[in-house]
Structure formats: structure tokens, C-alpha cells
Image: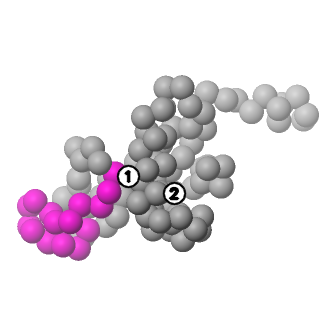
Amino acid sequence: MDILEGKVFSAKVISAEVGISVKEVFDHLEHIQKSVNRGNYHLVITPAECKKCGFVFRKRERLKKPGKCPVCRGESIQEPLFCLRRTGTLHYDDVQQG
Ligand SMILES: [Zn+2]
């Protein structure tokens, strides 16, 4: 997952870039989300948003794009975006080399 580090991406983009299915991307992301406390990465999620009325799906626990907006019933939904950040490291290697 190193190639994802520091980038903002949607599941579709990663699916195409890594060559795995969108479903597999979500499986990976859910795994990262669950293992945050012991992993090296932290998953930052930009929630899905309704393009029509601007409703933000903040409380949605699942990572997948919702089908419909509960407010306006619109089906034009901006996909959730993900960003993978490394946690707890201060890049000591860089300091030592510099
Ligand atoms: Zn809406």
C-alpha cells in the first residue's frame, strides 16, 4: 500500500491503478481502518457528499459510496475519498542522513 501514502484517492482510482477490483480495494481499506492502532498507517476519510443538495454522509460507517441521498433522494453522489498517512514516525532516517 506504499504507493497510496500521502495521496488522496477514490476507490475507483486505486482499483485501476493497482489492478484489483473495487471490492478488494474496500476490503483493504476496511482492514487498514480496523488495524489503525497497531498499524503504521492512518486512514483519513473524506465522506461522500450529495452533489445536488450538499448533504454529507458523515456518520456512514461503511466505506462504500451510498446509493441515494436521504435528504433529496438524489442519486448523484460524490464518492468518498481516502488518504493514507503514516502514523507516529518522524522520519528519523532522513535526519540521520542529513
Ligand atoms: Zn441530496
Asked if the stretch drawn in magenta spans residue 75, the answer is: yes
Judged left or right of residue 33, residue 89 is right
Q: Vertically, is 31 above or below 37?
A: below
Judged left or right of residue 69, residue 60 is right
Judged left or right of residue 12, residue 3 is right
Asked if the stretch drawn in magenta spans residue 41, the answer is: no
- Residue occupying image coordinates x 56% and y 37%: 41
Q: Is mark 1 within 8 Å of ligand 1?
A: no
Foreground residue among 8 and 35:
35
Q: Do the residues labelled 1 and 2 touch (CB within 8 Å)?
A: yes
Residue stretch in magenta: 63-77
Count the numbered circles shown. 2
Foreground residue among 68 and 35:
35
* Protein image colouring: one colour
Numbered circle sitting on residue 8: 2
First of labels 1, 2 by sequence position: 2
Q: How far from the left and from the top, in percent, is residue 93?
A: 82, 32
Q: Please name the residue that numbered disc 1 is placed on.
A: 46
Q: How far apart are marks 1 and 2 (CA)?
A: 9 Å
Quadrant of res 72: bottom left
Q: How far from the left and from the top, in percent, is residue 58?
A: 25, 47
Please say whether residue 42 is visible from this viewpoint. yes
Quadrant of res 3: bottom right
Give the amino acid type for the residue marked by disc 2 in the picture.
Val
